[in-house]
Image: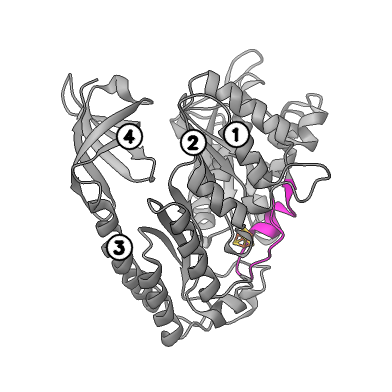
Amino acid sequence: MPKKNKSIKYYLMVLGCQMNEADAQRVSTVLEKNNCILTMNEPDADLIAVVACSVRQSAIDRVYGKIRIWQKIKKKKELITVLTGCVLPSDRKKLSPFFDYVLDITAISQLPQLLWQKPIDRQGANEYLEIEPLLSSDFQVYIPIMTGCNNFCTYCAVPHTRGREKSRASKQIIQEIKKYIQQGYKEITLLGQNVNSYGLDQKKELNFVQLLKKIDLITGDFWLRFMTSHPKDLSPELIHFIGHSKHLCPNLHLPIQSGDDQVLKKMNRQYTVKKYLSLIKKVRQSNPNLSVSTDTIVGFPGETKKQFQNTVKTYRQAKFDMAYIARYSPRPGTVAALWADDVTKQEKRSRELRLSNVVEKAGLKFNQRFIGQQVKTLIKNCKKIDSHQYKLIGKSAHDKTVKTIGPKKLVGQFVDIQIVEATPFGLSGKLKAV
Ligand code: SF4
């Protein structure tokens, strides 16, 4: 390692979902409190921390791909590698020999003790989500409100990696959100594996809708989002709130996973297609302007052509305007991993494409409604065109990607864009004078 007093350059490899991103921000806090500085240039790093994800095999394969490179670097210079994140016991066992340190994300505050024999921050060790995250953005923030999951969908690694549901104190969450809004943050996203069960694991705690209502009362110009909501316990109170909130964005992400009852049962999803479609109908009655997106797994063990066809039919009925479609891959230790992964890779790919086609059509139709309208957009990114102009890329309240041309200074700001074009994936238009 570098000599005492010299900063240690660290590189972060973050895989997986927004929860892992929020975890990585806490890894940064722990490291930067201990004389480390972030480098975006991997070969420069003295320390590489991987916040890994066992939810998909492809994410684990990416870690294996990097290990070979880091082993070569280690032959030339001193390099410390750390593995943490959302990792299944079997992946952890296989990956451990290639890392210098492996630890649970919940134990991340012990890292300085492991690396430099520093005293452990006890509070952080027990409640890692209370570690203040080091944010790279000054306009959007993920707020984990709980961790873990009690649902045990048969394909899913999360209950095995993150354990049972544990909610954070609402007082802490609300205080944190107020602070960010005062600092000018524009987009607050509440995170949890199933936000609907927020608070139920604690005595005398608010439930999810009560928490949302309190956040909705905070004054300021901000957007509120949450993910993810499980269809089995999407309550009438939440459906009502979706149509009557001041700050909540008109976008509901409601994972369906399959549009066939037998497959849903085998997945242990605890709802039927009929129940799911009736929920969608109710949320759209509550907010007719709502965008609805979903997650689906294609090629689940034993999924027949007819069962997949039922999913296509359900997609047409539900009219999802966005979807994240994953090809099934067995996760060791889950119930589904005991079943034959019997849908060929080619067939999975073809099912993914067929569903994507259905979503693209519905997405285009949904997005076309915005043509001619002025759409409030949070600019999140930009690409240089010339010395004055940038291609600005943002998100609308409906979570649609919106593109326009304008000055770089608008990144992180709300702007109004007159929409002139819609595609299945987003919108583009002219910036209203700023
Ligand atoms: S609800 Fe199911 S899919 Fe979602 S995290 Fe829990 S077990 Fe996994």
Relative to the observer, which residue lies in front, 39 or 355?
355
- The residue that disc 2 covers is 247
Q: Secondary structure at mark 1?
A: helix
- Tell me which corner region of the image, top left, top right, bottom left or bottom right, holds residue 384: top left
**First to last magenta residue range:** 148-166
- Residue 191 shows in the view: yes
Quarter that holds the N terminus: top right
Above or below, 259 relative to 433: below
Is residue 159 part of the magenta span, yes or no? yes
Q: CA distance from mark 1 to mark 4?
A: 21 Å
Label 2 close to label 1 by CB (< 8 Å): yes
Query: Residue tagged by mark 1?
Result: 215
Numbered disc in front, either 3 or 2: 2
User: Mark 1, mark 3: which one is toward the viewer?
Assistant: 1
Please state which amino acid type lies under the numbered disc 3: Ala
Q: Earlier in the sequence, mark 1 or mark 4?
A: 1
Quadrant assignment for the C terminus = top left
* Alpha carbons under labels 2 and 1: distance apart: 9 Å
At horizontal 34% and vertical 46% (from top left) the residue drawn is 400
How packed mark 4 is, by other alpha carbons closer than 10 Å (few <14, some 14-19, many 20 or more), is some
Identified by mark 2, the residue type is: His
Residue on which disc 3 sits: 362
Q: Is residue 114 visible?
A: no
Q: Where 361 falls versus 186 (above or below)?
A: below
**Label 4 sits on residue:** 376
Earlier-in-chain disc, 2 versus 1: 1
